[in-house]
Image: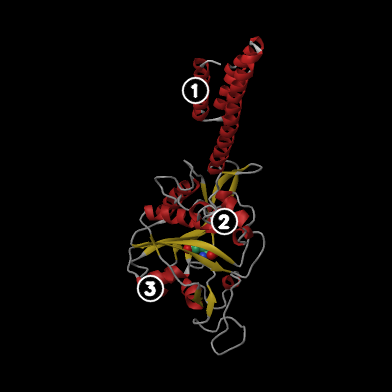
Amino acid sequence: MSDPEKSDLDSLQSQILGQIAAATDEAALEAVRIATLGKKGSISALLATLGKMSPEARKTQGAAINLAKDAVTQALGARREVLKAAALDARLASETIDVTLPLREPPAEAGRIHPLSQVWDEVTTIFADMGFAVAEGPDIETDDYNFTRLNFPEGHPAREMHDTFYFNPKGDTGSEPGAGGSRLLLRTHTSPVQVRTMLSQKPPIRVICPGRTYRSDSDQTHTPMFHQVEGLVIDKSSHLGHLKWILHEFCKAFFEVDNVNMRFRPSFFPFTEPSLEVDIQCRRDKHEIRFGEGEDWLEILGCGMVHPNVLKLCGLDPEVYQGFAWGMGIDRIAMLKYGIADLRQLFEGDVRWLTHYGFRPLEVPTLAGGLSS
Ligand code: DAH
């Protein structure tokens, strides 16, 4: 073998080894293998020339070409191992799981506002926009504020209708109700907050009183604890026309419809004269109720002009002051608006139920942004 041929083979070999080292993935490496050891590859072509050589030349050149072939084969194998390992490392890196990341959604995503809290906020938002302040009173009331000053005389049958939870009189273990005006009870309605407001504020008064109320009653439409929102307006000239306008505006805003037909029926409450009950028009389809239109009527509240006796018992002169009041069931309007069939579901604390009926914590009801959207 002459020197120039040997150096040709050397430079071919080092060129191929350079290509192998430069291959950055297995596909590029395979291309180098085909171009060198494949059927039409450069080294295969050299091996094919051996047959035409003299036995002498074949001996020396054959050994040299086979050495080059071995070197290339070995380099291909070594490079393939390196590239395989690098590909595995890259895959492992891309599939890494950070086990320190939280598994659950953050509370602001997963938590839900109870439909009653939502409705409570909706109601106060609407009345606040009309200029009403929120007044509060205790859940444990006196007989005096819950009944007597609201013109329920002692022994009056209207007291019986309230299924009152009484506390035992102080120092007495008996259970007879009616031991004077200081006997404690769980308030049966939010109306005693009217009394507290009139006793502590000078007219003009314009308040709503949302709160918990209690009666010993339990079935699909009654729970021992429920919610009401009371309204009270006292000044020198308010009349039933104002009351009707306020309730009409409230219903349109609350049920998020352009018009609501309302029906005012005569009724009786000891603390109002005249007394009225209010129904709103609705249509019940199989699975939903539409408000403001249709053939059915649904009762949603009681109201009336504050009775002169109540004004007197709360320290106001009925010759000077007059006003109106209403009381509405929050649970009831929540069930109507959000299609809740059984009142008891509101108080069961079932997380699955809450996930379905609840509201996202950051979607606070506003009149501008929408109450329930
Ligand atoms: N307190 C009444 C009840 O629970 C509801 C009610 C009716 C409140 C008429 C009022 C009103 O303020 O004027 O049955």
Q: Are marks 3 and 1 in contact (CB under 8 Å)?
A: no
Q: Nearer the viewer, mark 2 or mark 3?
A: 2
- The one nearer the camera, 175 or 104, is 104
In the rendering, at what x and y percent does residue 220 appear? 66, 59
**Is residue 291 among what the camera can see?**
no
Q: CA distance from mark 3 to mark 1?
A: 104 Å
Furthest residue to the bottom?
171
Left or right: where 312 falls relative to 222: left
**Is residue 366 among what the camera can see?**
yes
In the rendering, at what x and y percent does residue 188 appear? 54, 70
Determine the image quadrant of residue 305: bottom left
What residue is disc 1 on?
15
* Secondary structure of the residue carrying numbered label 1: helix
Q: Does the numbered disc 1 mark a residue whose Cβ is under 8 Å from ligand 1?
A: no
Residue type at mark 1 is: Gln
What residue is disc 3 on?
199
Left or right: where 218 falls relative to 185: right
Q: Does the numbered disc 2 mark a residue whose Cβ is under 8 Å from ligand 1?
A: no
Give the answer, above or below, for where 279 lies relative to 156. Answer: above
What residue is disc 2 on?
332
In the rendering, at what x and y percent does residue 91 appear? 56, 40
Q: CA distance from mark 2 to mark 1?
A: 88 Å
Q: Earlier in the sequence, mark 3 or mark 1?
A: 1
Q: Nearer the viewer, mark 3 or mark 1?
A: 1
